[in-house]
Image: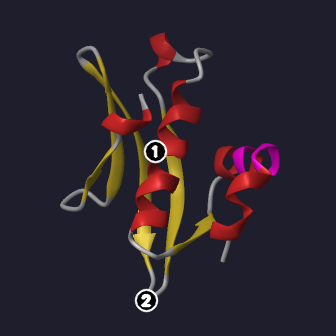
Amino acid sequence: MAASVRDNKDRSRFELDIGSEVAFASYRLTPSAVIITHTETPRALRGRGIASELVKGALDLIRRDGRKVIAGCGFVVDYLDKHPEDADLVA
């Protein structure tokens, strides 16, 4: 699923389509980092690992752009704690 995560720059959020639903992670930009401020998965789809796939895809895009990430929401903090392989991205 991570390959289908996209950066919707107009809405300042990373998005992942799941059928007709969209999970998203809102962000703010700084000169060198992306602050992920909120993640949201449609209620009916929660508990399936979709938010983790979304965050992983977002981190891949952030890495590709040569930026760092600042976890501004609890889910991203927890994700980064559980995935030390992405520690190099933390600002």
Q: Are the two marked residues, 2 and 1, in contact with CB atoms closer than 8 angstroms? A: no
Q: Is disc 1 placed on a helix, strand or loop?
A: helix
Disc 2 from disc 1: Cα separation: 21 Å
Check disc 2 and report the residue beneath it: 31
Near-viewer residue (24 or 55)? 55
Please tell me whether residue 32 is drawn above or below residue 36 in the rendered image: below
How packed mark 2 is, by other alpha carbons closer than 10 Å (few <14, some 14-19, many 20 or more), is few
Residue 28 is situated, as x and y percent measured from the top left of the image, at: 42, 70
* Magenta span: chief secondary structure: helix
**Which region is colored magenta?**
79-83
Near-viewer residue (4 or 75)? 4
Q: Give me the residue at 48% from left, 76% from top.
A: 67
Task: Find the residue positioned furthest to the top.
Answer: 44
Residue 2 is situated, as x and y percent measured from the top left of the image, at: 43, 36
Task: Find the residue positioned furthest to the left.
Answer: 10
Q: Quadrant of residue 65?
A: bottom left
Q: Is disc 2 placed on a helix, strand or loop?
A: loop
Q: Give me the residue at 41% from left, 57% from top.
A: 61
What amino acid does circle 2 point to? Pro
Residue 33 is situated, as x and y percent measured from the top left of the image, at: 51, 78
- The circle on residue 68 is none
Quadrant containing the N terminus in the rendered view? top left
In primary-sequence order, the first of circles 2 and 1 is 2
Check disc 1 and report the residue beneath it: 57
